[in-house]
Image (tube, helix red, strand yellow):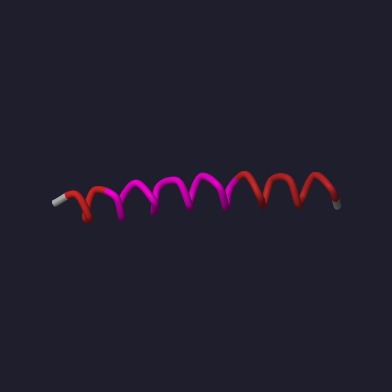
């Protein structure tokens, strides 16, 4: 159970992070 919730959390954080990165990249360009 803990591994599944951890994976979901990592997925959510990863998605948020990639969104922030793409925003930062588009802002730089």
Q: Is residue 23 left or right of residue 7?
A: right
Tag count = 0
Residue sitting nearer the eye, 6 or 11: 6
Residue 8 place in picture, x, y as percent: 30, 51
Q: Is residue 29 left or right of residue 20?
A: right
Residue 5 place in picture, x, y as percent: 24, 48
Q: Residue sitting at 58 percent across and 48 percent down?
A: 19
Magenta region includes residue 10: yes
| Residue stretch in magenta | 6-19
Q: Residue furthest front?
A: 2
The rendered magenta stretch, by its main secondary structure, is classed as helix
Residue 6 place in picture, x, y as percent: 29, 50
Residue sitting nearer the eye, 13 or 27: 13
Q: Residue sitting at 77 percent across and 50 percent down?
A: 26
Q: Residue sitting at 57 percent across and 52 percent down?
A: 18
Q: Residue furthest right?
A: 29
Residue 16 place in picture, x, y as percent: 51, 45
Q: Residue furthest left?
A: 1
Q: Is residue 19 left or right of residue 13?
A: right
């Amino acid at each position: 159970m803990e591994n599944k919730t951890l994976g979901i959390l990592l997925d959510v954080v990863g998605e948020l992070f990639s969104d922030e990165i793409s925003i930062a990249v588009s802002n730089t360009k």
